[in-house]
Image (cartoon, rainbow, N blue to C red):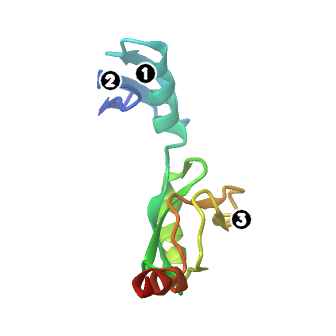
Amino acid sequence: MPEKEMRCIICPAGCVLRLSYDADGPALLALSGADCTRGREYAEQELTDPRRTLTSTVKVRGGRFPLVSVRSAAPLPKHLLRPAIALLRDLWAEAPVEAGSVLLDDILGTGTPLLATRAVPSQAIKSAMIAL
């Protein structure tokens, strides 16, 4: 029965989880170190289907800033993070961009949209401000 140790990242307590699992499943067989039920849920998720929220940037055409920060609307399967980042290298947003705007409807067939996390006004607004 394989064993693994990991730090729980669900809350600030950062419990050190020690788990035993069935490598064929994988299925959690035993867990110690979790101070709450959320720690058990985290360990099971990490063992069977690890997920992460994607955060990155996307290039902006005609914007006051050359990039806009983005995040996935929901966590993605961990094995898709590198392909998703590669996809974003070729993605462009047109200014103006509003915070919360959907820049990509579906990241790699997951059904999860990519959202802008800040506003990027168009370059024309910057030029108008300088003229004042």
Does label 3 or label 1 sit earlier along the sequence? 1
Residue 57 appears anywhere in the view: yes
Left or right of 66: which side holds 83?
A: right
Mark 3 surroundings within 10 Å by alpha-carbon count, few (fewer than 14), some (14 through 19), many (20 or more): few
Q: Residues within 10 Å of mark 1 (few under 14, many from 20)?
A: many
* Callout in the foreground (2, 3): 3
Who is closer to the viewer here, 17 or 87?
Answer: 87
Pinpoint residue 44: horizontal percent, then vertical percent. 50, 29
Q: Which residue is mark 2?
A: 17
Labels 2 & 3 near each other (Cβ < 8 A): no
Which residue in the structure is indicated by mark 3? 105
Count neighbours of disc 2 (C-alpha within 10 A) and say few if under 14, some if 14 to 19, many if 20 or more. Answer: some
Secondary structure of the residue carrying numbered label 1:
helix
Position in image of residue 78 (x %, y %): 49, 53
The amino acid pointed to by label 2 is Leu
The mark total stands at: 3
Label disc, if present, on residue 8 of the rendered structure: none
Q: On screen, 132 above or below 107?
A: below
Point out residue 17 in the picture as x, y percentages from the top left corner: 32, 23
- Residue 74 shown left or right of residue 69 in the figure: right
Residue hosting label 1: 39
Element type at mark 3: loop
Amino acid under disc 1: Gly
Please name whichever residue, 73 or 43, is drawn nearer the observer in this view of the structure. Answer: 73
> Where 66 sits versus 79, above or below?
below
Circles 3 and 1: CB atoms closer than 8 Å = no
- Going by the numbered disc 3, the residue's amino acid type is Asp
The answer to whether mark 1 and mark 2 are in CB contact below 8 A is yes
- In front of the other: label 1 or label 2? 1
Question: Label 1 vs label 2: CA separation?
Answer: 8 Å
Eye-nearest disc, 3 or 1: 3
Task: Give me the residue at 53% from left, 68% from top.
Answer: 84
